[in-house]
Image (tube, rainbow, N blue to C red):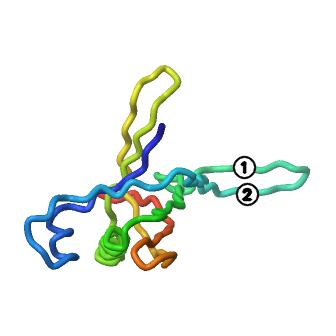
Amino acid sequence: MATFSFTIPASDVNSIKNTTGQPSFEAVADRGLSRQSKHRVLTARFGDGYEQRVRDGINTKEDMFSISFNNRDAEDINLIAGFLDDKAGTNFDFVITDTFSSGILSTSTLKVVCDGYNINYSQADNHGLSCQLRRVYEP
């Protein structure tokens, strides 16, 4: 089964919670997430149905991940939201672990940004958070 996650370093956990000595926190997305991929292509169309296509730039693949964290402790959701607030405008690592049909485990790390998120206050102590992560090609 594939897992999609990002790790909030201990230093960020401590600054968000205003504590010391807290371990790092791995935020694993719920099942049912979606990934939308698209390539940027420039197209020139001529008469009679003829057209020319060329990739637009070096990294032409655009990926969007719609992920959610449902029915989690309010503290965990607030920690994830605080991390996304801290990372506004900057990238962070998003880890994808997947298994191929041959049983080989593959792990990919992508740089992503989160432009916004939604919090669902379903109960007093359980909340949910959903967001879209956009892949970026930065160091």
Q: Amino acid at mark 1?
A: Gln
Q: Is residue 118 visible?
A: no
Residue lying at the far right of the rendered structure = 48
**Residue drawn at 58 percent across, 54 percent down:** 34
Relative placement, left or right, of 95 versus 33 is left
Q: Amino acid at mark 2?
A: Ala
* In-front residue for pair 16/132: 16
- How many neighbours does mark 2 have within 10 angstroms: few (below 14), some (14-19), or many (20 or more)? few
Q: Position of residue 23 (x, y in %)?
A: 16, 59
Residue at mark 1: 52
* In-front residue for pair 27/75: 75
Q: Position of residue 16 (x, y in %)?
A: 22, 76
Does residue 65 lie above or below 115 as drawn? above
**Residue drawn at 17 percent across, 75 percent down:** 15
* In-front residue for pair 77/59: 77
Total count of labels: 2
Residue lying at the far left of the rendered structure = 21
**Residue drawn at 47 percent across, 52 percent down:** 59
Residue at mark 2: 44
Query: Considering the numbered disc 1 on the image, is that residue within a helix, a strand or a loop?
Result: strand
Does residue 15 lie above or below 42 as drawn? below
Relative placement, left or right, of 61 versus 91 is right
Relative placement, left or right, of 13 versus 132 is left
**Residue drawn at 38 percent across, 42 percent down:** 108
Q: Are marks 2 and 1 in contact (CB under 8 Å)?
A: yes
Residue 28: assigned label: none
Relative placement, left or right, of 124 versus 101 is left
Q: Quadrant of the C terminus?
A: bottom left
Q: Is residue 124 visible?
A: yes
